[in-house]
Amino acid sequence: MSIDKSKKVVFSGIQPSGIPALGNYIGAMMNFKALQDEYDCLYCVVDLHAITVRRDPKTYGDQIRRLFAIYVAAGLDPEKNIIFVQSHVPAHSQLSWILNCYTYVGELGRMTQFKDKSRKHEENVNAGLFNYPVLQAADVLLYGTHLVPVGQDQKQHLELARDIAIRFNKVYGKIFTVPEILIPKVGARIMKLQDPFHKMDKSEVENLNNSIFLLDEPDVIISKLRKAVTDSEAVVRYGEDKPGVSNLLTIYSCLTGTSIPDAEREFEGKNYGFFKNAVGEAAVAVLEPIQNEYKRLMSDRGALDAMMKPGAEKAEGIAKNMLKRVHDAIGFI
Ligand code: TRP
C-alpha cells in the first residue's frame, strides 16, 4: 500500500508491554479493524516508547513479535495496512529529537501520564519518560496523519502533538498535518471485572481476575467472567448505578454487535449466572480464533520477522520524505 491522496491517513500505536487485555482489543484493535477499509492506516508496535521502563533483553524481542502477531491475528490485514515496528524506522527517533526543540519543558511537565508514571516508578524517572509525548508526536506527524484513534487517556498527548505541529508550521510553513483525535464512543472504557470504577489494564498485577488477556485459555476467560462483580438487584440492565453489569453489557454488546437495549431484552428475566456465561461464551467465540492464528504465527519466528519487513519498508519510504522536508525547512544541508 502506498499512501493514496484521496484517503485520510490513520496512525495508532500500542506498546509491546504485557499481553493486551480484552479492553485493549475492544477499545483499540476492533476500532483499528473497522477503519482499515475506509482509510490508509498505519499500526505501529511502539517498541521505543516501551523502554521508558526496563525490559529484559532476553524476552523483549518476543514481546515485540507477540504484539505484531496479535495485530495480524486480530484481523488487521498486512496488505491493506502498514503494520510495523517503530524501531525499524529510524525517522521516528530522528524527528523526535528535532521536535524536542519545539516543545517546552513546561508543557511536558504538565502531562498527567508523566506525573502518574514518575510517581509509580520513582526509582527510574528517566528523560525518556519525560519526552515520551514528543516521540508520540513524531510518530503521528511523520505520516501526515489525519486521524489518531486512541483511548481517552492519550488525549492530552495528542493535543500536545497538535500544538507542536501548529507551532512548527507557524515558523516554517505548512509542513505537518494537524491530526484529529478519534476517541471511540462505545467500548473505549472497558472496566476491571472486579473493580468496575477503573479501566481494565494489560499491566494488571494486583488481581488477575480484573483483566481478560487476549491469550487467556477459554476456561480461564469463562471463569474470570463468572467471577465478575455485579450487584444485588439481579436485573440485567445498563445504568450508572450498576457499574459491574453495565461493563459486562458493554463487553457483550461490543463482541456480538448487539445493541445494549437488545442485549437487555435478550437477558430479561435471566439471572446473572446465565448472563455471565453468555458474556463468557461471546468472549471465547471472538478470542479463540484469534488465539489460534496467533499461535500459528508465533510458531515460526523467521516467517514472522519476514512479515515485518514490507511494513517497515513502506513506512520508511513515507517517513523519509517527511524527515527530508523537515530538514530542508530548518536549513540543514
Ligand atoms: N502512548 C500510546 C499509549 O500508551 C501509544 C502510542 C505511541 C501512540 N505512539 C502513538 C498512540 C501514536 C497513538 C499514536 O497508548
Image: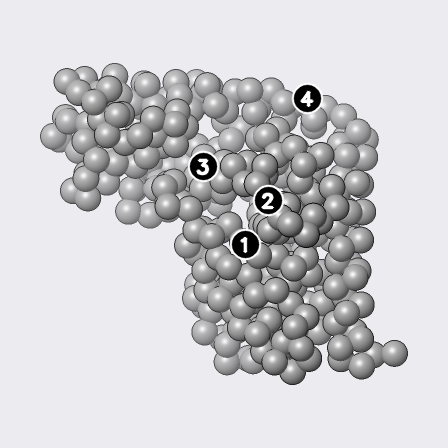
Label 4 sits on what residue type?
A: Arg
User: For residue 332, what is the image quadrant?
Assistant: bottom right
Earlier in the chain: of badge 3 and badge 4, it is 3
Asked if the residue at tag 4 contacts the one at tag 3, i.e. Cβ–Cβ closer than 8 Å, the answer is no
Q: Position of residue 26 (x, y in %)?
A: 45, 37
Label 1: element kind: strand
Colour pattern: one colour
User: In the image, is residue 27 above or below residue 92?
Assistant: above
- According to the picture, the residue beneath numbered tag 4 turns out to be 296
User: For residue 232, what is the image quadrant?
Assistant: top left
Label 1 sits on what residue type?
A: Leu
Label 4: element kind: helix
The CA span between labels 1 and 2 is 9 Å
The CA span between labels 4 and 2 is 28 Å
Label 3 sits on what residue type?
A: Ile
- According to the picture, the residue beneath numbered tag 2 turns out to be 39
The CA span between labels 3 and 4 is 22 Å
Q: Position of residue 24 (x, y in %)?
A: 48, 41
